Amino acid sequence: MARRDRNESKLLDVDASMQGSLAFKDPVNLRINGSFEGKLDTKGSLTIGENATVRADITGEEIMIGGKVTGNILAQKELKILSHAHIVGDITTPVLSVEPGAVMQGKCQMLSYSSGRKSKTFNADELAEYLEVEVSNIVTWANSGKIPAFKEGNEWRFERVSVDEWIAKEKAK
């Protein structure tokens, strides 16, 4: 029971005009019903309501779009596009569902994931070699949040799948 209450408290329903950069480190259930302009970086589920207007690059795990979105979308697990949705921007996701009536303008890249295989994880030195750049660049990017990374103790770690998605997104710019 306590676990369910904790999850319910992580529901954020926004019915207002907002501008800026929203980034969540912990999973939340975010629903945007108003307008948003800037950058969205979410964990958990993100829903763009039918009456919402979003002008932002969006990164998230599970994304459902019912309104208007202008910007690139990176859904790490799944993207659902509802019938009233209108999207202008490039899409990257392993799983995509599109209802009849939805409008999409942009490129779509479907990434395949092996569900039983654990993603390769790099340390900064290994990633520098993989990307053929200096280690100092990797650390600078990680410290500034430019590249997807997480800390294990005091050391930056990088998942290959996330880095490959980031590279594809950066090339599209």
Image: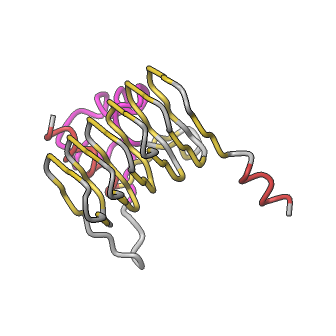
Total numbered badges shown on the rendered structure: 0
Q: Position of residue 6 (x, y in %)?
A: 77, 51
Q: Quadrant of the C terminus?
A: top left
At 24% from the left edge and 50% from the top edge, which residue is drawn?
91
Q: Is residue 71 above or below residue 158?
A: above
Based on the picture, tell me whether residue 46 belongs to the magenta stretch: no
Q: Nearer the viewer, residue 47 or 159?
A: 47
Q: Position of residue 66 (x, y in %)?
A: 39, 50
| Residue furthest out toward the top | 19
Q: Nearer the viewer, residue 24 or 88?
A: 88
Could you tell whether 89 is left or right of 98 in the image? left
Could you tell whether 40 is left or right of 162 in the image? right
At 68% from the left edge and 45% from the top edge, which residue is drawn?
10
Quadrant of residue 13 within the rendered picture = top right
Quadrant of residue 72 within the rendered picture = top left
Q: Position of residue 9 (x, y in %)?
A: 74, 46
Stretch of the chain drawn in magenta = 121-148
Quadrant of residue 39 within the rendered picture = top left
In this figure, which colouring scheme has been used for the structure? Answer: secondary structure
At 32% from the left edge and 70% from the top edge, which residue is drawn?
113
Could you tell whether 112 is left or right of 25 in the image? left
Magenta span: helix, strand or loop, mainly?
A: helix
Q: Nearer the viewer, residue 76 or 166?
A: 76
At 52% from the left edge and 52% from the top edge, which residue is drawn?
45
Based on the picture, tell me whether residue 147 belongs to the magenta stretch: yes
Q: Position of residue 60 (x, y in %)?
A: 43, 48
Q: Quadrant of the N terminus?
A: bottom right
